[in-house]
Amino acid sequence: MSKKLKLNLVLLGVITLLLCLAIGVTAYFNNLPQHLSQHETIILGQSRLSPGSQAVLRVLTRDSRNASPLPGTEVRVTIQPSNAGPAQLIYTGKTDDEGMAVVSFRVPDEAETNQVLKIYTRSKLGAEQIERELTLERNHGFS
């Protein structure tokens, strides 16, 4: 066998190997979302609150791959003026067996109208921070 033929066979083998590798990597990344478990946080609650009232929101955490709950997820919630004033911690706790935390808090009486609610969650699958705009306004009767 000549050197030229050996070189061509080696080159053909390398090209075949690279092609198989490229196909494998492409298939892996195309199917990655279906195989990857991720921490997902869902917030249920109002965006308009009345100062001095009692407010409640629900924080749900689950595995994004199969929607199974993430019990024991650490949850921390703060409220902060939109103009970057000091944040006030309003809740710390963990989710229950259903991956849910019921966050109940008193809306500050003298808070500014525009606030940001920040929800931090951390589980075995990851962590997430969500910010929600809140509007605080007094309800002076029915319209």
Image (spheres, helix red, strand yellow):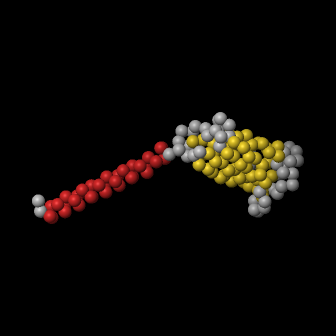
Q: Residue furthest left?
A: 1
Q: Nearer the viewer, residue 135 or 91?
A: 91
Decide: is 116 above or below 64.
below
Q: On the rendered structure, is 93 left or right of 1?
A: right
Q: Is residue 128 left or right of residue 15?
A: right
Residue 124 drawn at (x, y percent): 59, 45
Residue drawn at x 82%, y 43% is 54
Q: Is residue 143 visible?
A: no
Q: Residue at x 67, y 45 (%)?
A: 74
Give the residue drawn at x 27%, y 55%.
16
Location of residue 96 in the rendering, given as x and y in whole percent from the top left corner: 68, 37
State the quadrant of the N terminus: bottom left
Displayed quadrant of residue 112: bottom right
Residue 141, horizontal then vertical, whole percent: 88, 45
Q: Is residue 100 left or right of residue 68?
A: right
Residue 45: x and y in percent read 72, 44
Residue at image point 15% right, 64% down: 4
Q: Quick one: quadrant of the C terminus?
A: top right
